[in-house]
Image: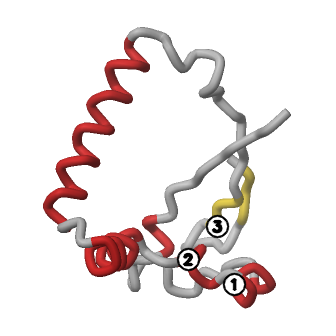
Amino acid sequence: CAIGGGVDSISLVQPKVGKGAVPERKLLKTFPALWMPMIETADIVANRYGISRERQDEYSVESQRRTAVAQAANLFDDEIVAMSTKMQVKDKETGETSLV
């Protein structure tokens, strides 16, 4: 049995939004590239493998298109599942926290 997962962490790489976000310190020390923004990854691919940023963008658009078609055809129904989550929210005025 294998489980794969992914999280888009765009908010953690934006200086104003991600300010103060603390990644898992042990992982950060061992695998700092886990927190590398995708824009840096794209630049590395362009330089290392000679695949232009434009070509990578074209491929990304095509990949998204294919995914949308496959999802519309219910091909991922057994692979993509909803998960219930909760997050703690702090009221800026009162300081009160709640789980939503």
Cβ–Cβ below 8 Å for labels 2 and 1? Answer: yes
Q: Amino acid at mark 1?
A: Leu
Residue nearest the observer in this picture, 12 or 45: 45
Q: Give the secondary structure at mark 3.
A: strand
Q: Position of residue 67 (x, y in %)?
A: 38, 29
Q: Position of residue 20 (x, y in %)?
A: 58, 86
* For residue 86, above or below residue 91: above
Mark 1 lies on residue: 28
Q: Earlier in the sequence, mark 1 or mark 3?
A: 1
Which circle marks residue 90 in the picture? 3
- Name the image quarter holding the N terminus: top right
* For residue 63, above or below residue 60: above
Q: Position of residue 78 (x, y in %)?
A: 65, 17
Q: Quadrant of residue 90?
A: bottom right
- State the separation of the CA atoms marked 2 and 1: 7 Å
- Residue 48 relative to residue 30: left or right: left
Q: State the residue at coordinates (43%, 74%).
A: 37
Q: Amino acid at mark 2?
A: Trp
